[in-house]
């Protein structure tokens, strides 16, 4: 248990650091939200100054940071200039959509990568394995953006899937089952492009880790005991190869999240991605900080989840953790 | 005469678990005392986990003991500071059980035996090569093998190489930690002969750590039996053999596989 | 009829450079039901290759070139993969070297033992669990329950070795092949394991192939001993005969290498042991003649040109050496 408490403390510390850095960097970038107003002859400089002081942009950085921390402690994340409202509810709505995308893509990518990687490892160096290796290598060099755009073109040409947004027009009138169907259809394109972007890396890692243990003495011993091939691969080999893969899982949550931010923009999915982009361009300070922090939270959450999985999967780690 | 090595009441605790603050202590050495006269061999026998290897590390100044002293040529090595220990370390060398894992497989035989000179900054480059070749001669590795990589050598040759490296800095005490245990019988015989030759020509002193009673009997002048971090019995070999006092000694003797030839019959003990 | 017959077995490994290196070159022997055959050989003699080749478990660069492995009337080199799987673990139990690496690191012991049972017979969960605990109880007189729930890293070397034995005998095989089963254990544990082998053989009527580099282990346990040198059978015969009056020059030299018995006093202490000069041959070079010839103290002219044939020197006692030819 102490192991996890330490991990969690570590995570909190990390988030704290990230917030500090984002604050610092945003202060270092030239200009702020109200600079554009100054260029507008209809707004008097006094009004701008009044707004600046209302949002405390005229105060020194440490004071602003302290203020913001205080707001965070009260469950708020500051105020959005563009949306003219608190940041927290705005972020939560968007984060939900991003999470939906990321979690679905993560699960799907792993569900495909595991059997494919094991299948390939069992045929290591032979023709089917080589074909797969070439395919994954090719997919790896295609940039995510090109992949997403390609899918978009395909969808536009064929009209099989909706090409943007989360729901269709008139979503509110649909029955529950139709609502789910509608969301699922909208998810297809972004999820597929995310899966295609991460799958090659996952398959290659699964293949390499499983191929690594296939020569292990305990697998030869298990084969010598007549354990059937399927069980040998999926129970013995995969389990033994699990540790690096679980760590990779935590990492893959991160890549999928950053990939998702990009794909959301391209496919106009109402997630954190477009919001972040908008607010960066508009210098909507607190939305940027909140968005970065939230993405970081997901990343840390993913890694913590991987740690828990690792703890559950490997008795040697349990022994080491309980000895501490 | 003053013994080369005298260990007095050596205690070593390890913290159970990884953090040093842990309250549970494992006692690896529980008041060990022994001495080896110069030029002789002391066999240290005992089961795995009895503390033999910990003792070896403490004597070689590679692990600090919790308490007690290690007198080497009249100097308490355990009480010395890190810098002074560095001066002492070349005099005490270790040879381990598995030569494959203590030699860098990508280095050539010559690289491996000249490394100690390099680390200690001794001799010029051509001088190092000459001395390294002499060391290889000493352990009977043919000169044509000098350019071979360690992983191309056989198990016996690797162990010869490990011995050559240990001899490079002209140590007085060689700690042989299960140095023969992983070798085939015929290779064991070759290496044990080499060790006996080196002892008589260089006047080396050996601490011969093993769980093989028969080999201990063959190599050593004195024997010490270790059990649960203590030396439970020690003395000249004949004495211990004729009247073993401790249960650990008796069970080790009984477990040593050997055959006795009464005409035509082999008995397994 | 013998339980196992191995005829003219040739195995080779291919190096990455494409070079082919023979590891076994024409091995012949047979084994009766309930018999213990000790295979004695040093590193590079091909003894581990022999164990793996019997069940076609060679690493991917190893190849059985020719030969016959007849087990219970079937040629194991030609049976279908399905039949082979049933024989592995079902009819022939296997104990590989290194108990620490032969068990899956993250599966519980009980699970690993019951997997072997489940691979060969269909049992309901309860029957399976019951049989697993019986099996573990047969090798662990005390503590079987706790060990069943343990993971390999929580057990000592001797205990892991016992688990391997339980796996090997799980499905009532008629033959167990053990490759260096005690090499990494200390003498007390080694003795316990050897005694366990003796007990199992008596109780279950198992035949065994016990592969080792240490002749002393075989004394009192093996019925017959096969001495392997450079992938060939140097000598095979009754254990007592081979150990007390070895006929092949290699066997004789190997046994002289052992330190004399410590109980016999101090006369031989700190004296040089007789050794076999030189190193084992490099089998990739295909040297003509007897493989032991360069190291042999009794070599003759003929030894350089031809390979010696098998000669009988006594009842069931055969030696491949020109000393006994004609």
Image (cartoon, rainbow, N blue to C red):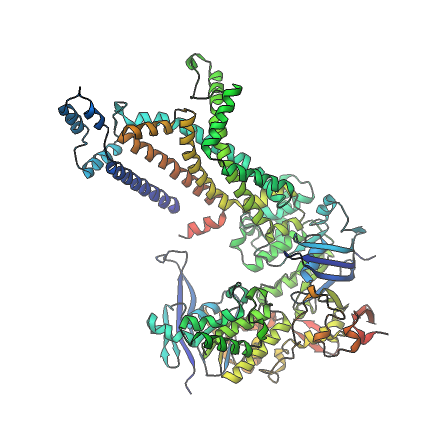
Task: Tell me where residue B136 appears, x and y as whole percent.
Answer: 54, 76
Task: Tell me where residue B106 appears, x and y as whole percent.
Answer: 52, 63
Drawn side of residue C126 relative to residue A162, left or right: right
Quick one: A113 or A263, which is closer to the camera?
A: A263
Quick one: A105 or C40, which is closer to the camera?
A: A105
Drawn side of residue B91 relative to residue B152, left or right: left
Quick one: A52 or B194, which is closer to the camera?
A: A52
Quadrant where the N terminus of chain A is found in the figure: top left
Task: Tell me where residue C273 appears, x and y as whole percent.
Answer: 63, 80
**Residue positioned most to the bottom:** B1
Quick one: A97 or C192, which is closer to the camera?
A: A97
Taking the spot 36% from the left edge, 34% from the top edge, the residue there is: A295
Taking the spot 50% from the left edge, 69% from the top edge, the residue there is: B112
Does B239 appear above or below C38? below
- How many marks on residues? 0
**Residue positioned most to the right:** C326
Write down the quadrant of residue A51 in the picture. top left
Drawn side of residue B242 relative to residue C26, left or right: left
Taking the spot 37% from the left edge, 56% from the top edge, the residue there is: B19
Task: Tell me where residue A155 appears, x and y as whole percent.
Answer: 51, 22
Tell me if I can see residue B89 in this picture.
yes
Drawn side of residue A180 relative to residue C111, left or right: left
């Amino acid at each position: 248990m102490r192991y996890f408490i330490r991990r969690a403390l570590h995570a909190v510390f990390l988030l704290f650091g990230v917030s500090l850095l984002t604050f610092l960097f945003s202060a270092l970038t030239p200009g702020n939200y109200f600079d554009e107003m100054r260029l507008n002859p209809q707004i008097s400089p006094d009004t701008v100054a009044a707004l600046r002081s209302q949002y405390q942009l005229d105060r020194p950085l440490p004071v602003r940071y302290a203020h913001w921390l205080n707001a965070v402690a009260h469950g708020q994340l500051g105020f959005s200039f563009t949306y003219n409202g608190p940041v927290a509810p705005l972020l939560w709505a968007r984060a939900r959509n991003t999470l939906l995308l990321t979690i679905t893509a993560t699960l799907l990518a792993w569900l495909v990568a595991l059997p494919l990687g094991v299948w390939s490892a069992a045929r290591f160096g032979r023709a089917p394995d080589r074909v797969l290796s070439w395919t994954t290598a090719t997919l790896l060099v295609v940039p995510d953006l090109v992949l997403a755009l390609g899918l978009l073109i395909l969808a536009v040409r064929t009209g099989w899937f909706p090409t943007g947004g989360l729901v269709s027009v008139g979503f509110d009138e649909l029955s529950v089952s139709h609502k789910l169907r509608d969301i699922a259809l909208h998810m297809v394109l972004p999820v597929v492009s995310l899966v295609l972007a991460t799958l090659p890396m996952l398959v290659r890692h699964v293949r390499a880790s499983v191929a690594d243990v296939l020569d292990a003495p305990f697998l030869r011993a298990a084969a010598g005991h007549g354990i059937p091939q399927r069980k040998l691969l999926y129970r013995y080999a995969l389990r033994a190869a699990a540790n690096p893969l679980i760590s990779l899982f935590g990492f893959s949550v991160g890549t999928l999240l950053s990939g998702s931010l990009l794909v959301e923009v391209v496919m106009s999915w109402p997630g954190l991605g477009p919001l972040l982009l908008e607010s960066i361009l508009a210098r909507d300070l607190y939305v940027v900080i909140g968005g970065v922090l939230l993405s970081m939270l997901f990343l840390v959450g993913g890694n913590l989840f991987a740690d828990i999985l690792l703890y559950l999967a490997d008795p040697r780690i349990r022994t080491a953790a309980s000895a501490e | 005469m003053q013994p080369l090595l005298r260990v007095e009441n050596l205690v070593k605790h390890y913290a159970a678990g990884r953090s040093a603050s842990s309250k549970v202590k494992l006692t690896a050495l529980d008041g060990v005392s022994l001495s080896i006269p110069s030029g002789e061999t002391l066999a240290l026998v005992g089961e795995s986990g009895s503390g033999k290897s910990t003792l070896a590390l403490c004597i070689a100044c590679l692990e600090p003991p919790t308490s007690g002293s290690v007198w080497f040529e009249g100097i308490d090595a355990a009480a010395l500071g890190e810098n002074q220990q560095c001066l002492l370390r070349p005099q005490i060398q270790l040879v381990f059980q598995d030569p494959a894992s203590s030699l860098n497989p990508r280095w050539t035989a010559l690289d491996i035996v000249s490394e100690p000179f390099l680390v200690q900054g001794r001799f010029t480059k051509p001088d190092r090569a000459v001395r390294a070749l002499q060391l290889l001669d000493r352990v009977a590795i043919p000169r044509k093998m000098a350019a071979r990589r360690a992983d191309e050598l056989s198990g016996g040759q690797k162990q010869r190489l490990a011995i050559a490296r240990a001899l490079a800095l002209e140590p007085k005490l060689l700690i042989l930690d299960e140095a023969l245990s992983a070798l085939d019988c015929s290779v064991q015989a070759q290496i044990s002969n080499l060790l006996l030759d080196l002892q008589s020509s260089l006047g080396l002193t050996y601490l011969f750590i093993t769980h093989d009673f028969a080999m201990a009997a063959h190599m050593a002048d004195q024997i010490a039996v270790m059990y649960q971090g203590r030396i439970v019995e020690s003395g000249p070999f004949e004495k211990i053999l004729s009247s073993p006092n401790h249960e650990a000694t008796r069970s080790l003797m009984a477990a040593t596989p050997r055959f006795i030839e009464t005409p035509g019959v082999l008995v397994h003990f | 009829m013998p339980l196992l017959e191995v005829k003219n077995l040739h195995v080779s490994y291919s190096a990455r450079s494409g070079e082919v290196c023979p590891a076994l070159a024409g091995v012949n022997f047979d084994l009766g039901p309930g018999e213990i055959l000790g295979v004695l050989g040093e590193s590079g003699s091909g003894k581990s290759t022999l164990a793996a080749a019997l069940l076609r478990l060679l690493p991917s660069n190893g190849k059985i070139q020719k030969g016959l492995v007849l087990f219970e009337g079937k040629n194991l080199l030609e049976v279908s993969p399905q039949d082979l799987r049933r024989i592995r673990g079902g009819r022939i139990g296997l104990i590989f070297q290194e108990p620490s690496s032969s068990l899956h690191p993250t599966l519980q012991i009980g699970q690993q033992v019951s997997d072997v049972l489940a691979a060969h017979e269909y049992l309901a969960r309860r029957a399976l669990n019951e049989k697993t605990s019986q099996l573990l109880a047969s090798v662990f007189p005390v503590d079987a329950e706790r060990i069943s729930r343990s993971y390999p890293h929580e057990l000592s070397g001797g205990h892991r070795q016992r688990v391997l034995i339980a796996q090997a005998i799980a499905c009532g095989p008629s033959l167990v092949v053990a490759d260096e089963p005690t090499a990494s254990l200390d003498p007390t544990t080694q003795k316990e394991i050897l005694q366990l082998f003796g007990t199992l053989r008596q109780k279950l009527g198992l035949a065994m192939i016990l592969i080792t580099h240490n002749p002393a282990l075989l004394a009192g346990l093996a019925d017959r001993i096969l001495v392997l040198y450079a992938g060939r059978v140097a000598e095979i015969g009754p254990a007592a005969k081979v150990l007390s009056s070895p006929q092949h020059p290699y066997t004789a030299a190997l046994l002289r290498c052992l330190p004399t018995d410590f109980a016999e006093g101090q006369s031989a202490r700190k004296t040089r042991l007789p050794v076999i000069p030189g190193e084992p041959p490099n089998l990739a070079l295909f040297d003509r003649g007897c493989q032991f010839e360069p190291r042999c103290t009794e070599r003759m002219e003929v030894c350089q040109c031809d390979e010696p044939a098998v000669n009988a020197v006594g009842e069931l006692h055969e030696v491949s050496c020109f000393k006994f030819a004609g």
